Image (spheres, grey):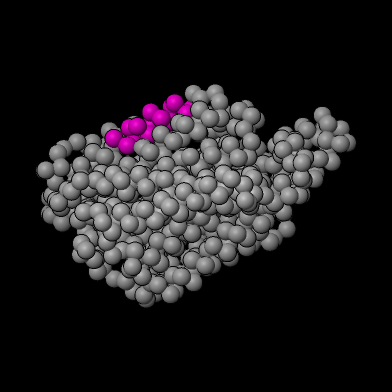
Amino acid sequence: MGSPSDTRPYGRTGGSGRGRRVAVVATMGLALFVIVLNNSSLNIAIPTLMRDLGAGLATVQWIVDAYSVVFAGLLLAGGACADRWGRKRVTLAGVAVFGAASAVAALADTAWQVVLARVVLGAAAAFVMPGTLAVLIDEFTGRERATAIAIWSGVASLGVAAGPLLGGLVTASAGWAAVFWLNVAPAAVVVVAGALVVRESSDPARGPVEIIGAALSVLAVGSLVFAVIEFGALGYPAPPVVAGAVVAVVAAVAFAVRHRRAARPLVPRGLLRDGPFLGASVGNMLLFFGLAGSLFVLTQRLQFRFGLDPVAAGLAVAPVALTVVLASVCSPVLVRRCGDRVAVAAGLGIVAGGLVVLAAVPAGLAGVLAGLAVVGTGFGVAVPAATGVLVSRVPEERAGAGAALNDTMQELGFALGIAVVGATLNRFFTASLGADADRAATLHSEGERAAVIGGEQGALIVEQAGAAFDRAATAGLFVAAAAALVAAVLTIVLIPARVGEHRRSTP
C-alpha cells in the first residue's frame, strides 16, 4: 500500500487524473457506506433477532451500542494512527478486519456472541472512518473539497437512512444474520479498489500516538453510554447507573488533564475553545442523535404496532434516504448563498420539526412517511455544512485527527441517540405495564400470533403493550426533537455567518 515516507500532497499537483479522483471518492464512499450501514440495517432485524436469540430490550441495546461505544471511543486514536502510519494503510486494514468480523457475527448463535463481534466491528470501523475523510481532505481543495465532503456526508447519511430498507430485504429472505453477510462483499471490493486507486498520505511530523488519551476516551464514552442504558432498565439511583456516571466523569476529567499535558494530544490544542468548532461538533452529534434515536424507535414501531414485515418496514422509512441524498446535493449551494450558520441551523430546525411530526401525528403510515421525509431533508442540509465547518478549523497536517473529531461526534450522537431514546422507550414502557412489562414485550413482539394463542387474555395484553409502546415511542421522539432544537440554538450562537476556507495552524 505504499510507505508513509513516500507520501505527498497529491491533491495539489497536476499528476492526478480526474478518473482516478472520481474512483477515490467512490471507493472511500463505499468504505464509509459499509460501516455506517452496519448500524442502521441491524435496527430492522431487531425483532427477528430478539425471537431467535431470546434477547431482551437491554441486551438488544447493547448489541446495537457495543459497536457505537467502541467506535466512538477509538475514533480519535484511529485518526492519529492514520496520520502516523498512513491513511490508506490504516483505512484498508480496518476494512479488511471489518469484513472478517462481519462474517463471525453472522455465524453467532447467542446474543452475547453478537455483542462481542460488534465490539470488534466497532474497533475496526474506528480505523476506517477517519481515513476516508482524511484522504478526501488531502485529495481536494476549494470548492472541489466542499463537494467531496458533501458527497462523503451524503453517503454517511444514506447509510443510516437506507439501512432499514436493505436490512429488511435481507432479513426477510435470509434472517437476521444476513445483515452481517451484507458487509462482506463490499469490504472486499474496497480493499482491492483502494489498493489500486488511493495514494498514501500522512502527517509529515508523524509523532507518537497518544495511547493514554485514547484509553481514557474509550472509558469515558463507554461508561457514559452504559450509565444511560442501565438507567433505562433500572432507573436512578441504581448502583450500576451511579457507577457508570461516576466513571464517565472521572475519565472525562482525566482525558482533559492528559490533553493539556501530552506532547501531541489526540485533539489539537485550542479546538475545544473554538466557537465554530464547538457549534459544528454539537450540531453533528445531535443530528445523529435525532436520526439514530428516531429510526431505533420507528423500525420497531412499524413492525410491533403496525404489523409490517421487515421488508415493508424498510420501505416505509425509505423517504428519509431519498430526501437525505437530495438535500446533501443542495447543501453546498445553500452554504455558498446563505452562509454556514444558516445552513446548519436551518437543517437542525427542519430535523426538529420532522421529529415533532413523527411524535405528534396520529398513528399511521402517512404521518410516518411525512415526518421521515422532513427529517431526511434537514439532515441532508445540515450534516455536510457542519462537517465543512468542523474540518475547516483543524490544521491541514492533522487531517486524520480532524476527520476523527468529526466522526467521534457523529458516532457519539448515534450511540447516545439509541441509548437515550431507547432508555426513554424502556422507562415509559415499563412504567405503563409494571411487573408485566417483560411478558408484555415478549407477547408484543409476537403480535397477532400471541393474541390468537393466548385467547382473550393474550389479545388484551397485546393491545395494552401496543398502547404503552406508542406512548413510550412518542416520548422518545420528543426527546430527540428537543435535542435538535438545542443544537440549532447553539449553532446560531457559536458559528459565524461564514466560516470560509480559513484553516487553523497547528497550536
Q: Is residue 101 magenta?
A: yes
Residue 437: x and y in percent read 74, 41
Residue drawn at x 33%, y 68% is 274
Quadrant containing the N terminus is: top left
Residue 240, position as x, y percentages in the image: 57, 44
Q: Which residue is more in the foreground, 174 or 51? A: 51
Whether residue 422 is visible, yes or no, is: no
Residue shown at the point (40%, 67%) measured from the top left:
279
User: Residue 415 in magenta?
Assistant: no
Q: In this view, does 136 lie to the left or right of 488?
A: left
Between 60 and 381, the one nearer to me in the picture: 60
Question: Foreground residue, 148 or 116?
Answer: 116
Image side of residue 187 versus residue 205, left or right: right
Count how many numbered circles sit on residues in the image.
0
Rendering coords of residue 374 (x, y %): 56, 61
User: Can you tell which quarter of the image residue 409 is in?
Assistant: bottom left
- Residue 263 in percent (x, y) is at 21, 54
Identify the main secondary structure in magenta.
Answer: helix
Asked whether the viewer can see residue 490, the reply is: yes
197 sits to left or right of 149: left
Question: Which quarter of the rendered picture does the C terminus lie within?
Answer: bottom left
Residue at (46, 40) in percent of width and height? 67
- Is 242 rendered above or below residue 506? above
Residue segment shown in magenta: 93-106
The residue lying toward the viewer, choosing from 268 and 469, is 268
Quarter of the view holding residue 452: top right
For residue 172, above or below residue 27: above
